């Protein structure tokens, strides 16, 4: 079997081009410009970099972006008040609360507060529940696993009956990736740090999604 | 490896005994008798039998049960009105909508209508979402997979790092069973009718939960 490297940048460029046309059409036909609000708490450099990439993608496609930054010591009430304000703002159609939040904040309460219809990250428990259940459709799908599926489709992967191995079980990547693959009729194995013979399991995979934050976990 | 047959009836008898004492204590200390409402639509004999078993278990443990039966041609509005009435009834602490519902009814809407705090089947999308997510707790866990885990625990099964295979991916058994096993640190493989070499996958299982409605699917 020879390896194929998927040209992710080319796929992204094509998707952004399609999106730009759709955004322009929405503005021309309905006078509506989609708006994305970002919520960033604290000084995590990776989070700042992610948010800045998301805002850049908005600018490229004609989407309005509304950045919101709070200091690392923001209180639960302050973050919740901000989310409520964004829920009520008609110019804001999507809300991204950048994770991880500082440890003193209750992430579950904050994510559950995001309006189901603005939960573009798909992290509201109702969206995860719908993603998990057969015959239900989430309003939004978490972007990282969704992107992985799109790239696999681009590479011509066959999901039906394939052995798919997902390494990691995080709420934001591993778990939703496994759910997406189950719904595509793959036989899905969820592995993690406790898995026995990880290399052996991975070798049996037709599709392998690595979603652990540790380099060289599989040797 | 020798087989051990778990005495499920003995485990059930012990749990019912504990429950009976807890129900009596709640009545003595707080004057509250737990109440379970069942909703049965149509004439499915298996459904009637399940509901009757649940009511019998209530009677044995001192729980009030409130049976509700609607004809097979009940409308969506009629079923929804019944669920709303039960949500508002302070004597009803749990609501079981017996599945499957007749095909003309919108199951998703009816299950989403059950108050989160009375969703004793755990089928509300918020409860499934919380069950799926790491670090979240559902208010209720679907009973069949939960019972399977309890019986495995009784049999002394070790979950941590075990290879667990779940055969079936239904919303009510297979999917929640897989989620419960993932949270217990098992390496979980979800199999189904499209799985290649099902017997081979099953042979590698330390724990196998069969939850498909077809006899002899694994040969």
Image (spheres, coloured by chain):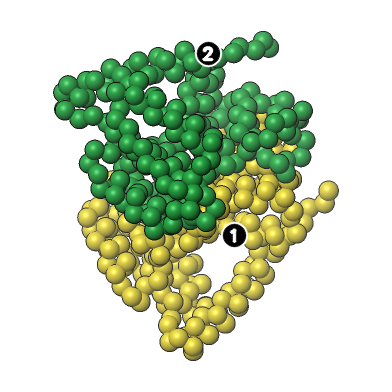
Chain colours: A yellow, B green
Residue B212 rendering spot, x and y as whole percentages: 64, 36
Q: Chain of mark 2?
A: B
The label on residue A147 is 1
Residue B17 rendering spot, x and y as whole percentages: 35, 15
How many residues crowd mark 1 within 10 Å: few (<14), some (14–19), many (20+)? some
Q: Is residue B190 above or below residue B147?
A: below
Residue at horizontal 30%, vertical 62%? A83
Q: Quadrant of the C terminus of chain A?
A: top right
Q: Is residue A208 above or below residue B7?
A: below
Q: Is residue B189 above or below residue A75?
A: above
Observer-nearest of B10 and B169: B10
How many residues crowd mark 2 within 10 Å: few (<14), some (14–19), many (20+)? few
Residue extending furthest bottom?
A28
| SS for callout 2 | loop
- Residue A6 in view, yes or no: no
Nearer to us of marks 2 and 1 is 2
Residue extending furthest right?
A1
Q: Are marks 2 and 1 on the same chain?
A: no
Observer-nearest of B50 and A174: B50
Residue B168 rendering spot, x and y as whole percentages: 62, 38
Residue at horizontal 34%, vertical 54%? B81
Q: Chain of mark 1?
A: A
Residue B49 rendering spot, x and y as whole percentages: 49, 31
Left or right position of A217 against B107: right
- Residue A146 in view, yes or no: yes
Q: Quadrant of residue B37?
A: top left
Residue at horizontal 54%, vertical 35%? B46
| SS for callout 1 | helix
Q: Is residue A197 above or below residue A182?
A: above
Q: Which residue is mark 2?
A: B7
Residue at horizontal 49%, vertical 83%? A26
Q: CA distance from mark 2 to mark 1?
A: 47 Å
């Amino acid at each position: 079997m020879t390896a194929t490297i998927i040209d992710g940048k080319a796929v992204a460029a094509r998707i952004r081009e399609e999106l730009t046309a759709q955004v322009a059409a929405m503005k021309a036909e309905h006078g509506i410009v989609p708006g994305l609000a970002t919520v960033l708490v604290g000084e995590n450099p990776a989070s700042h970099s992610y948010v800045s990439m998301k805002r850049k993608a908005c600018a490229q496609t004609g989407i309005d972006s509304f950045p919101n930054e709070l200091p690392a010591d923001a209180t639960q009430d302050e973050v919740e008040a901000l989310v409520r304000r964004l829920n009520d703002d008609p110019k804001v159609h999507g809300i991204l609360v950048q994770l991880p939040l500082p440890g003193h904040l209750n992430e579950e309460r904050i994510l559950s507060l995001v309006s189901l219809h603005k939960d573009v990250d798909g992290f509201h428990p109702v969206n995860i529940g719908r993603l998990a259940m057969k015959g239900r459709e989430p309003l939004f799908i978490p972007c990282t696993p969704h992107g992985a599926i799109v790239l696999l489709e681009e590479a011509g992967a066959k999901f039906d009956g394939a052995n798919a191995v997902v390494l990691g079980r995080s709420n934001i990547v591993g778990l939703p990736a496994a759910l997406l693959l189950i719904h595509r009729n793959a036989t899905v194995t969820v592995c993690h740090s406790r898995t026995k013979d990880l290399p052996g399991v991975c070798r049996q995979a037709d599709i392998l999604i690595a979603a652990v934050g540790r380099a060289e976990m599989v040797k």
